[in-house]
Image (cartoon, rainbow, N blue to C red):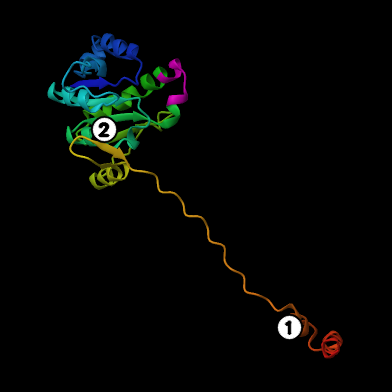
């Protein structure tokens, strides 16, 4: 099975897994490890798109790729990439947001620590095409992977919010954020303080004094 590590995973880890795959334990798993860079189009290629992962994902799928391990912690906020991953039937494993704040050694250590759980999930018959699994930011075996697969409707809904087509095919304009309306201040009713004083005093001494002043 062909497994790709995207450009957010240190490229050295791809080489490490390629070396490990020659060992006895990895040979039994029949995994082939590749890098997203091996499939990334060059600027002169017709399918090149700047800062877009969809082209290399398409190439990887055509090459028989099945699994993507991603260090892009913002992937769930990128509907176009999520839709490409789902349409190609990839099994996706990605890290939590805090993983991006870790240093190099912590990142690679976490991937190696959880690899047995990832490998087990890849080989599991319950793993379906288009599933997304989050790798926990924890060095605890009881906190390995959890399913974060988005539904098709959710991806389409997020995609429609993220961008709206304008001016013909291929052109996309990011929809402006909705600005909160300013709070309207409630207009206070005019209060007759003189009447209030009468009510509060119950028509007593203060009321009579005020009334006598008015008569004058």
Label 1 neighbourhood size at 10 Å, few (<14), some (14-19), many (20+)?
few
Q: Quick one: quadrant of the N terminus?
A: top left
Q: Main secondary structure of the magenta part?
A: helix
Total count of labels: 2
Image point (62%, 74%), residue name: 189
Residue linked to disc 1: 195
Q: Foreground: 11 or 177?
A: 177
- For this rendering, which residue is in front, 78 or 170? 170
- For image coordinates 39% across by 17% down, the residue present is 108
In this view, the mark in front (2 or 1): 1
Q: Secondary structure at mark 2?
A: helix
Q: Quadrant of residue 176?
A: top left
| Residue named by callout 2 | 81
Say which element carries label 1.
Answer: helix
Where residue 212 sits: x, y (%)? 86, 89
Reply above or below: 28 against 196. Answer: above
| Magenta highlight on residue 101 | yes
Residue 109 lies, in percent from the top left, at 41, 18
Category of crowding for the residue at label 2, using alpha-carbon neighbours closer than 10 angstroms: few (below 14), some (14–19), many (at least 20): some
Chain part drawn in magenta: 100-107
| Residue 187 inside the magenta-drawn segment | no
């Amino acid at each position: 099975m062909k497994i790709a590590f995207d450009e957010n995973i240190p490229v050295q880890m791809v080489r490490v897994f390629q070396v490990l795959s020659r060992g006895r334990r990895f040979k039994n798993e029949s995994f082939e490890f590749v890098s997203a860079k091996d499939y990334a189009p060059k600027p002169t290629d017709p399918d090149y798109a700047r800062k877009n992962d969809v082209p290399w994902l398409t190439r990887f799928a055509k090459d028989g790729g099945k699994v993507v391990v991603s260090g892009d912690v913002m992937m769930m906020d990128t509907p176009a990439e999520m839709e490409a991953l789902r349409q190609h039937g990839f099994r996706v494993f990605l890290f939590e947001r805090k993983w991006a704040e870790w240093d190099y050694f912590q990142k690679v250590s976490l991937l190696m620590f959880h690899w047995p759980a990832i490998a087990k999930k890849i080989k599991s018959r319950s793993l379906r095409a288009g599933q997304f699994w989050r790798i926990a930011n924890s060095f605890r075996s009881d906190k390995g992977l959890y399913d974060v697969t988005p539904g098709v409707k959710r991806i389409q809904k997020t995609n429609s919010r993220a961008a709206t087509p304008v001016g013909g095919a291929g052109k996309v304009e990011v929809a402006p954020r909705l600005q909160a309306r300013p709070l309207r201040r409630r207009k206070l009713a005019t209060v007759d303080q003189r009447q209030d004083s009468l009510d509060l005093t119950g028509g007593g001494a203060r009321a009579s004094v005020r009334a006598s002043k008015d008569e004058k």
